Amino acid sequence: MARIRGIGGIFFKSQNPEALREWYAKHLGIVGQGEQGTLFRWNQPDSPYADNFTAWCIFPASTTYFQPSQSPLMVNYVVDDLDAVLCALRKEGVWVDPKVEEYDYGKFGWIMDPDGNRIELWEPLPKKQKK
C-alpha cells in the first residue's frame, strides 16, 4: 500500500502573520489570502484526484489547529486511502488523532511524529468521471 502521494500543504505559525505574509509577497512573490494562504497547482498525470495542489499558509501563533503539538510547523501529506493508512499506523504504534474530518474537498486525519510534530493526512476527492 502506497502511503504518501505528495505534499498537500505547508502550514506554520507566526507572531505577526500579516507582516510575514507581506514579506513573502514582496520578496518571494507568494501572495496569499490570509490564513487560507495560496495554492501551488501541479500536475500528476496518473493522479486520481480532482485537484493537485500544495497549500502554503501562515497561521497566527495563537492558533489551536496544530494541537496537541507545540511545534510551529505542520506538514500535510496527500494519501490515496486515509482509512487504510490510519489503520496501518495505529497497528504500528503511531499516535493517531481519533477524529477524522470530511469536507467537500476530501477527508483529513492527523498523527504525531516522535518529536511531537502534528502531521495532517489528506485524501482528496477523486476526479469526476467524464460523461
Image: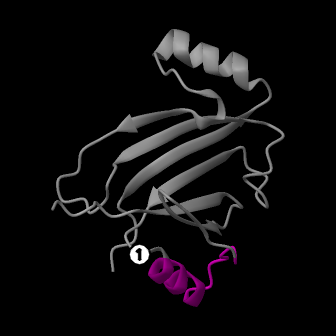
Taking the spot 39% from the left edge, 35% from the top edge, the residue there is 40
Q: Is residue 92 part of the magenta span, yes or no?
A: yes
> As drawn, is 61 to the left or to the right of 90?
right
Q: Determine whether 59 is above or below 43 in the image.
A: above
Asked whether, in this view, residue 122 is left or right of residue 119, the answer is left
Residue 33 is left or right of residue 82, and the answer is: right
Residue 65 spot, x, y in % from top left: 74, 52
User: Which quadrant does the C terminus fall into?
Assistant: bottom left
| Residue 26 drawn at (x, y percent) | 54, 9
Magenta residues, start to end: 83-98
64, 102: nearer the viewer: 102
Seen in the image, is 112 located left or right of residue 40? Answer: right
Type of colouring:
one colour
Q: Amino acid at mark 1?
A: Asp
Q: At 33% from the left edge and 80% from the top edge, which residue is drawn?
A: 1
35 to 66, vertically: above or below:
above
Q: Quadrant of residue 86?
A: bottom right
Of all residues shown, which one is farthest toward the top? 26
**Above-or-below relation of 95 to 51:** below
Circle 1 is placed at which residue position? Answer: 81
The residue lying toward the viewer, choosing from 37 and 104, is 104
Element assignment for label 1: loop
Mark 1: few/some/many CA within 10 Å (<14, 14-19, 20+): some
Q: Residue furthest bottom?
A: 91
Residue 79 x %, y %: 41, 66
Residue sitting at the far front: 131
Instruction: Single out the residue that lies furthest toward the right.
Output: 62
Residue 21's spot in the image, x, y percent? 63, 21
Q: What residue sits 51% from the left and 20% below the top? A: 31
